[in-house]
Amino acid sequence: QVQLMESGGGLVQAGGSLRLSCTASGRIFSTDIMAWYRQPPGKQRELVASITYGGRTWYESSVNGRFSISRDNAKSTMYLQMNALNSEDTAVYYCNLAREPSGVTFHFWGQGTQVTVSS
């Protein structure tokens, strides 16, 4: 089992920056993919960015160039640096770890952290 704990959310003005952290407890495998999702008010949860153990990244188009995902495997911690924030980035941000031991994907989730961008 893996437990995920996010931190770093809060209230920020448009144009500002925030850095989210997610620390995992339990064993992490080199095939695990970690990711950040977000759920804006009244909308479905969406994938924001992901990173493999080796550091390969993917970004959703609206955050590409503004957000940066990184990972410190020694500390079992993932980060999301968010710059040039705007009101559309307001959401609950969730840390996710996806594990596929044998063709079936298991997802582990953090409890979420609120990010509110004021205009």
Image (tube, rainbow, N blue to C red):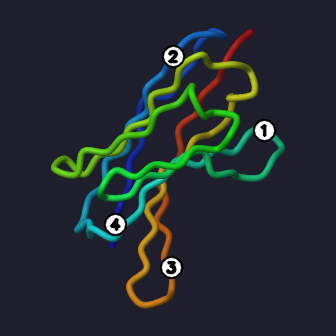
Q: Residue at x 26, y 66 (%)?
A: 28
Label 3 – label 4 distance at C-alpha: 14 Å
Query: Which residue lies under the disc numbered 1?
Result: 41
Q: Secondary structure at mark 3?
A: loop
Label 4 – label 2 distance at C-alpha: 29 Å
Horizontal and vertical percent position of residue 75: 19, 47
Q: Name above or below for residue 13 compared with residue 116.
A: above
Query: Which residue lies under the disc numbered 4?
Result: 2
Mark 3 vs mark 4: which is more N-terminal?
4
Mark 1 vs mark 3: which is more N-terminal?
1
Q: Secondary structure at mark 2?
A: loop
Badge 1 amino acid = Pro
Mark 2 vs mark 3: which is more N-terminal?
2
Q: Is residue 72 visible?
A: yes
Mark 1 vs mark 2: which is more N-terminal?
2
Q: Secondary structure at mark 1?
A: loop
